[in-house]
Amino acid sequence: MRLMLLLACATEVTQTAACAAFVSCAQARDAQLGLETDVARFDAAGDCWGSPAGQDLCNEACENGLAFLNERYAGLPTECAE
């Protein structure tokens, strides 16, 4: 049992490709519009990457966020291409 717990804790959780794309898009759009969106939790050093469950939740949020931006706004920077 202890070995299983140690192995479960040793799982490395890193930023997903979807969140890297979402952060890049949001930052490029902010630069374009003179805005500042708080995407820190989705950044590579953000709070999303503390557990597999957090990673899954944040990845879904990033996928949905990028899709929303592409559906809602025209003239997005090239970083937002899906």
Image: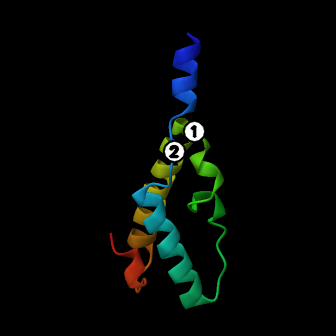
Label 2 or label 1, whichever comes before in sequence order? 2
Q: Would you identify the image quadrant in which residue 67 lies?
A: bottom left
Colouring mode (rainbow / by chain / secondary structure / one colour): rainbow
Q: Residue at x 57, y 59 (%)?
A: 42
Picture coordinates of residue 39, whole percent (x, y) = 62, 65
Q: Quadrant of the N terminus?
A: top right
Picture coordinates of residue 49, whole percent (x, y) = 57, 48
- Alpha-carbon neighbours of circle 1 within 10 Å: few (<14), some, or many (≥20)? some
Kindly identify which numbered label has been placed on residue 13. Answer: 2
- Alpha-carbon neighbours of circle 2 within 10 Å: few (<14), some, or many (≥20)? some
Is residue 34 shown left or right of residue 11? right
Q: Quadrant of the C terminus?
A: bottom left
Residue type beneath disc 2? Val
Kindly identify which numbered label has been placed on residue 18. Answer: none
Residue type beneath disc 1? Ser
Above or below for 12 versus 63: above
Picture coordinates of residue 54, whole percent (x, y) = 57, 42
Residue beneath disc 1: 51
Q: Are marks 2 and 1 in contact (CB under 8 Å)?
A: yes
